[in-house]
Image (cartoon, rainbow, N blue to C red):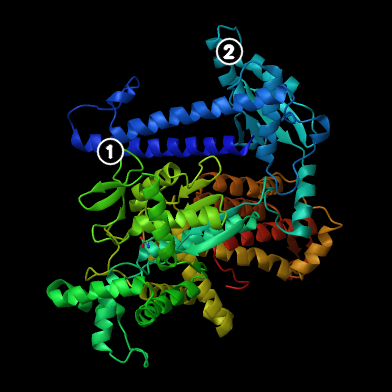
């Protein structure tokens, strides 16, 4: 389907998700409010008008989106029929197996879509429901469309039953060699059993060529905005989350072949710099020649804020400093740079420890562009006077953007308007991703609406996502703070992680087997890996509890467990005298072993890697990758418990090496490594 269609579908999915979240919240609120009074479950016939405004709007929006996507789908089909566009229907020659890297699920969906089109050409909105089978008794995949199609036919007054529909679909699915059989079961499920040869081919390619990304329609320029901390203010755990999430989504999009611009929208501009510069001039008068020893910028900030609030003369001077700075007076610019450098160095240290990279395009970068965009909005008649401010309404149901303050200054809103214009028109971005806490959701909704209204952004050509995340809580379920109630210093937090990871490795006796250098590597991988994994493995929109105890557990879905698993898998080949290189060579001539049920189960999960990536590009949920990684290691364990890779005699001497199985181990390790790499987590060969 076309890009537009996918986009609409994506937005409908997001809206649907939001509806669910709001409904859940509503339910919670209601149960709290009506404890023991009565059941206030929303009756199914509730009219949209009876619902709270937010929810009603989302539902309406979603209905509209779905309608638009249906219209679009029909239009595309219409065009195809009239021959104006190459037919979306796949020709026999195209019925080849999905290339390595492309998803099996995607291919099956395509084929069943075609079968439905052929069997029921008049049904335009028939759902194509193909899923992975939960139980291998029911094949490898399943198509469950028949039930819904039968219902649709019934609605149209046509007689039919699901089994009949299933029969018809099966007869219309073109034959393809990599599906061994299609079986109808129960009320009308179609169980799909793959031919294992697809596993042989795909895995041997994986072993010889490495993990391949899913094919993309076209390479896009994508801006990912993160971690975007603020000068002279504490970098808090929210920025840590932004950094972790932004880094990971950037890696994923780079891997699948897009041109990703990682951008740090550093908060380095604004009126607060006036007071900081004025204070600097007083405290370190010779700052122009000697580097001022501002040790603690927080303290410095507080001091200058106090003076700003209490001393009118100082306040006046601070304002003058802002004016000078914004007109790029070199003396003031130098002072500003010195101040920025103090924060920047601190931030950089944290990013370096966590392998987070993004290029600085601070708010200051947009000063002249802000002036220009204000003029543009003014000329287009989009600014409204409001008590001396100039505001712009993006959406009637949200607060407006403040584009010019009453003192003539610009705001966060102004800077984002200039920024979005720069990104779309100069950087040629087709997809904008903003990684910040969910508290800024309104800001980005209004930004999108304003950009569309101003003709800066065409929503048909540019996709915009606010990749929002929930707050970090302490183990007491309250906002994450130190015992004395202050913001947690990130450097101290990372140090604590290192210490705890070190203890964990000692507890496991690793200090006895690893060299000091190996131990240090393992400690860092573990410490930073567990912090990242705990963050990424939760649905980002939810709040999550920061707990070193939990993240360092060696069972369950944790980085510790998974990193150990990877080193264990690697050690299997090592003990058999093999390396990645020798196995790669062997993969050219030896097939992966897939006869045992557990071998095949493992292979199927390996083949689903691409599906997972595709899913993430739709909803930006990196937790899918963590779930996948965990599932992979679970099926690996089952395989390993049931299938010998290396057999030894009673003296412990190697008797048989099952190379086909070692290849499966190698494929698993390769895919796991790729997952870790995308998650931004370092792996180690020994741990
Ligand atoms: N283009 C943007 N608004 N990016 C996000 C900036 C985040 C902001 N500096 C903050 O700390 O909350």
Q: Position of residue 2 (x, y in %)?
A: 63, 36
Residue in the image at 60% along x and 7% along y: 159
Q: Position of residue 342 (x, y in %)?
A: 38, 80
Is residue 569 left or right of 511 when viewed as pictured? right
**Of helix, strand and loop, which one carries label 1?**
helix
> The N terminus appears in which quarter of the rendering?
top right
Whole-number angstrom distance, CA of label 1 to CA of label 2: 38 Å
Is residue 444 visible to the viewer in this orientation of the structure?
no
Foreground residue among 505 and 337: 337
Residue in the image at 60% along x and 71% along y: 684
Question: Of label 1 and label 2, which has the lower sequence position?
Answer: 1
Question: Which numbered circle lies on residue 28?
Answer: 1
Q: How many marks?
A: 2
Q: Which residue is mark 2?
A: 153
* Image quadrant where residue 516 sits: bottom right
Q: Is residue 513 above or below residue 238?
A: below
Q: Is residue 171 above or below residue 64?
A: above
Q: Position of residue 376 (x, y in %)?
A: 42, 51
Q: Is residue 500 above or below residue 61?
A: below
Residue in the image at 27% along x and 85% along y: 281
Is residue 92 left or right of 221 when viewed as pictured? right
> The C terminus appears in which quarter of the rendering?
bottom right
């Amino acid at each position: 389907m076309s890009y537009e269609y996918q986009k609409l579908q994506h937005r409908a999915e997001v809206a649907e998700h939001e509806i669910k979240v709001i409904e859940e919240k509503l339910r919670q609120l209601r149960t709290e409010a009506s404890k023991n009074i009565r059941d206030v479950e929303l009756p199914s016939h509730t009219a949209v008008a009876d619902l709270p405004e937010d929810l009603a709007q989302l539902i309406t929006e979603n209905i509209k989106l779905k309608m638009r996507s249906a219209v679009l789908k029909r239009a595309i089909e219409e065009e195809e029929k009239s021959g104006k566009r190459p037919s979306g229907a796949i020709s026999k020659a195209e019925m080849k197996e999905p290339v390595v890297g492309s998803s099996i699920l995607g291919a099956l969906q395509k084929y069943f879509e075609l079968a439905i089109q052929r069997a029921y050409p008049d049904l335009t909105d028939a759902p194509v429901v193909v899923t992975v089978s939960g139980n291998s008794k029911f094949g490898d995949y399943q198509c469950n469309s028949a039930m819904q199609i039968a219902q649709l036919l019934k609605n149209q007054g046509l007689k039919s039953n699901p089994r009949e529909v299933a029969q018809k679909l099966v007869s219309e699915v073109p034959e393809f060699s990599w599906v061994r059989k299609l079986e109808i079961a129960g009320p009308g499920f179609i169980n799909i059993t793959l031919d294992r040869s697809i596993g042989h081919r795909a895995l041997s390619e994986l072993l010889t060529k490495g993990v391949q990304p899913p094919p993309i329609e076209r390479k896009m320029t994508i801006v990912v905005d993160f971690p975007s901390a603020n000068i002279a203010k504490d970098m808090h755990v929210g920025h840590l989350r932004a950094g972790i999430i932004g880094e990971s989504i950037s890696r994923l999009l780079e891997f699948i072949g897009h041109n990703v611009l990682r951008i740090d929208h550093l908060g380095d501009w604004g009126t607060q710099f006036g007071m900081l510069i004025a204070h600097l001039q007083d405290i370190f008068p010779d700052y122009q020649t000697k580097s001022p020893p501002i040790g603690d910028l927080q303290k410095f900030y507080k001091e200058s804020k106090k003076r700003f609030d209490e001393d009118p003369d100082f306040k006046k001077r601070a304002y003058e400093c802002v004016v000078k700075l914004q007109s790029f007076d070199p003396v003031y610019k130098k002072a500003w740079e010195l101040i920025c450098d103090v924060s920047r160095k601190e931030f950089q240290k944290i990013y370096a420890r966590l392998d987070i990279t993004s290029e600085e395009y601070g708010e200051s970068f947009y000063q002249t562009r802000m002036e220009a965009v204000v003029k543009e909005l003014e000329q287009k008649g989009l600014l409204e006077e409001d008590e001396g401010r100039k505001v712009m309404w993006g959406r009637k149901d949200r607060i407006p953007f403040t584009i010019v303050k009453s003192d003539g200054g610009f705001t966060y809103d102004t800077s984002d308007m200039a920024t979005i214009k720069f990104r779309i028109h100069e950087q040629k971005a087709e997809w904008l991703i903003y990684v910040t806490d969910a508290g800024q959701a309104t800001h980005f909704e209004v930004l999108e609406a304003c950009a569309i209204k101003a003709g800066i952004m065409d929503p048909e050509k540019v996709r915009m996502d606010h990749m929002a995340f929930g707050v970090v809580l302490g183990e007491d379920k309250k906002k994450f703070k130190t015992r004395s109630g202050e913001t947690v210093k990130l450097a101290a937090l990372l140090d604590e992680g290192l210490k705890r990871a070190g203890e964990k490795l000692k507890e496991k006796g690793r200090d006895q087997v690893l060299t000091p250098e190996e131990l240090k590597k393992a400690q860092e991988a573990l410490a930073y890996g567990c912090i990242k994994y705990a963050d990424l493995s939760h649905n980002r929109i939810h709040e999550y509890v920061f707990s070193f105890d939990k993240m360092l557990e060696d069972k369950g879905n944790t980085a510790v467990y998974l990193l150990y698993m990877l080193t264990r898998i690697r050690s299997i080949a090592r003990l058999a005298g093999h390396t990645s290189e020798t196995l790669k060579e062997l993969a050219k001539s030896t097939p992966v072993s897939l006869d045992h049920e557990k071998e095949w189960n493992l292979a199927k999960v390996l083949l689903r890697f691409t599906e997972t990536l595709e899913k993430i590009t739709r909803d930006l949920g990196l937790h899918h990758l963590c779930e996948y990684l965990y599932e992979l290691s679970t099926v690996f364990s089952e395989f390993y418990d049931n299938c010998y890779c290396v057999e030894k005699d009673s003296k412990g001497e190697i008797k048989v090496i099952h190379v086909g199985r070692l290849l499966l181990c190698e494929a698993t390790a390769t895919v796991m490594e790729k997952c870790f790499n995308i998650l931004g987590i370092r792996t180690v060969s020994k741990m």
